Image (cartoon, grey):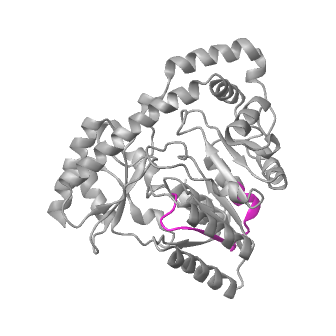
């Protein structure tokens, strides 16, 4: 059977699909057999197995067969109410999703037509860029500037260009807290500025906040949603604060937006996984999630500090990196002329993995950058991995 016999069967959208370089790494290698700074995996040490086991038994005793039946598309009331209480919003503004990745996808699906503009940071989250491309959106990235006026003017310029081309801007996608991949956060003034731009030019904001509760230092900053609840869609996830095996997240938005997401989800998965929802709801209500989260934050802070110290000790001159106050990632910038994609095969062959930064840039720039994760490996393996990566870089630069 010829493989090209299917070519005229696929939809036009297939041509817009983009393979995740992170997932391609996972297909090729055993992450435990190399020094992997590549994935965004939480540490398995943060998974509260005994508490989860006890909670599962409690759910079965409490709900019986109901925990294994179909459920409401918007999510079980117990979890919606728990999320609403945690986030300080009315329950009618909460939709449970099957991961925050699904939240990104359904927002794009219900808001974007082919050719519509989505604004985002550059770099930005790879999974979001994949979703946007699959719906044939026109993605316009804006690089961050510490000068807020220059930052504003950069966005104004991109907005003006889109309008001059007759394009409709549908939303701004932003991870304001400990961004993936850079680890950086927006200040309150920057959040206020972006919300004001959305109000001025009449587009929505999708605020993706999977790392918000993983803060290791500094002051908590108000969400963008809190600045304009009717214009901002706030996405959250249990993957980083509980366990990614429970494919659960949430969307908080105006009921008119949630109604379209609700209908969209009916054709995707009918409802989020019911048993998982009851477990998450009980874990929240019992206080076990917060107790475990406190331990996770202490562990990740220690790992972040360890990686920052390793980079300072071993990395060659001319390399700089971000200093995140939370989250799971930091971002390295090498001297101009370095190409992280070309260097990757050499690094992987030697036994160390990272993600090349250009994949996170909508325009393919950032060729001299790479993302590193500090949550997955032990400190001992991080030490050996940084030493090896630094040695390879020193021989190349």
Q: Is residue 110 above or below residue 165?
A: above
Q: Is residue 376 above or below residue 324?
A: above
With 38 as the anchor, is 132 left or right in this view?
Answer: right
Q: Measuring from the top left, give residue 341's x and y in whole percent.
A: 34, 63
Determine if the magenta segment contains residue 1.
Answer: no
Please identify the quarter of the rendering in which residue 75 is found.
top right
For the point 51% across and 17% down, the residue is 50
Q: Measuring from the top left, give residue 161's x and y in whole percent.
A: 62, 85
Instruction: Please state the extent of the stretch shown in magenta in the rendering.
Output: 107-125
For the point 46% across and 47% down, the residue is 327
Q: Measuring from the top left, give residue 182's x and y in whole percent.
A: 43, 58
Please identify the quarter of the rendering in which residue 374 is found.
top left
Near-viewer residue (79 or 132):
79
With 305 as the anchor, is 363 left or right in this view?
Answer: right
Q: Is residue 60 above or below residue 90?
A: above
Looking at the image, how many numbered discs can be counted on the residues?
Answer: 0
Q: Measuring from the top left, give residue 156's x and y in whole percent.
A: 61, 80
Q: Residue furthest bottom?
A: 164
For the point 73% across and 71% down, the residue is 199
Determine if the magenta segment contains residue 109.
Answer: yes
For the point 71% across and 33% down, the residue is 82
With 18 as the anchor, is 22 left or right in this view?
Answer: left
Residue 2 in view in this figure: no
Residue 116 in view in this figure: yes
Near-viewer residue (12 or 64):
64
Q: Residue furthest top?
A: 61
Q: Quadrant of the C terminus?
A: bottom left
Near-viewer residue (189 or 202):
189
């Amino acid at each position: 059977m010829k493989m090209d016999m299917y070519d005229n069967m696929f939809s036009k959208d297939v041509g817009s699909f983009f393979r995740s370089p992170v997932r391609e790494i996972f297909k090729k290698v055993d992450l435990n057999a190399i020094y992997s700074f590549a994935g965004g995996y939480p540490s398995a040490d943060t998974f509260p197995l005994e508490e989860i086991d006890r909670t599962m038994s409690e759910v079965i005793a409490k709900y019986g067969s109901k925990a294994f039946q179909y459920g409401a598309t918007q999510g079980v009331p117990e979890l919606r109410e728990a999320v609403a209480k945690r986030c300080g919003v009315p329950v009618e503004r909460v939709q449970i999703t099957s991961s925050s990745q699904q939240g990104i996808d359904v927002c794009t699906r219900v808001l974007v037509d082919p050719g519509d503009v989505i604004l985002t940071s550059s770099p930005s989250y790879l999974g979001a860029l994949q979703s946007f491309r699959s719906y044939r959106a026109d993605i316009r990235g804006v690089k961050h500037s510490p000068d807020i006026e220059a930052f504003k003017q950069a966005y104004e310029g991109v907005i003006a260009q889109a309008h001059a081309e007759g394009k409709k801007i549908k939303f701004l996608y932003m991870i304001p807290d400990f961004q993936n991949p850079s680890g950086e956060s927006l200040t309150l003034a920057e959040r206020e500025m972006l919300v004001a731009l959305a109000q001025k030019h009449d587009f929505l904001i999708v605020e993706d906040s999977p790392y918000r509760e993983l803060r290791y230092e500094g002051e908590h900053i108000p969400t963008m949603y809190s600045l304009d609840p009717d214009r901002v869609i706030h996405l959250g996830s249990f993957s980083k604060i509980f366990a990614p095996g429970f494919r659960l997240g949430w969307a908080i938005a105006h009921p008119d937006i949630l109604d379209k997401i609700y209908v969209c989800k009916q054709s995707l998965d009918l409802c989020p996984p019911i048993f998982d929802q009851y477990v998450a709801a009980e874990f929240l209500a019992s206080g076990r999630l917060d107790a475990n989260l406190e331990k996770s934050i202490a562990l990740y802070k220690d790992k972040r500090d360890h990686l920052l110290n390793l980079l300072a000790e071993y990395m060659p001159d001319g390399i700089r990196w971000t200093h995140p106050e939370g989250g799971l990632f930091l971002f390295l910038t090498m001297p101009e002329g370095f190409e992280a994609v070309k260097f990757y095969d050499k690094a992987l062959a030697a036994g160390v993995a990272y993600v090349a930064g250009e994949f996170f840039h909508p325009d393919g720039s950032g060729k001299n950058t790479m993302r590193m994760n500090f949550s997955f490996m032990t400190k001992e393996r991080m030490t050996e991995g940084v030493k090896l990566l630094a040695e390879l870089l020193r021989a190349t630069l």
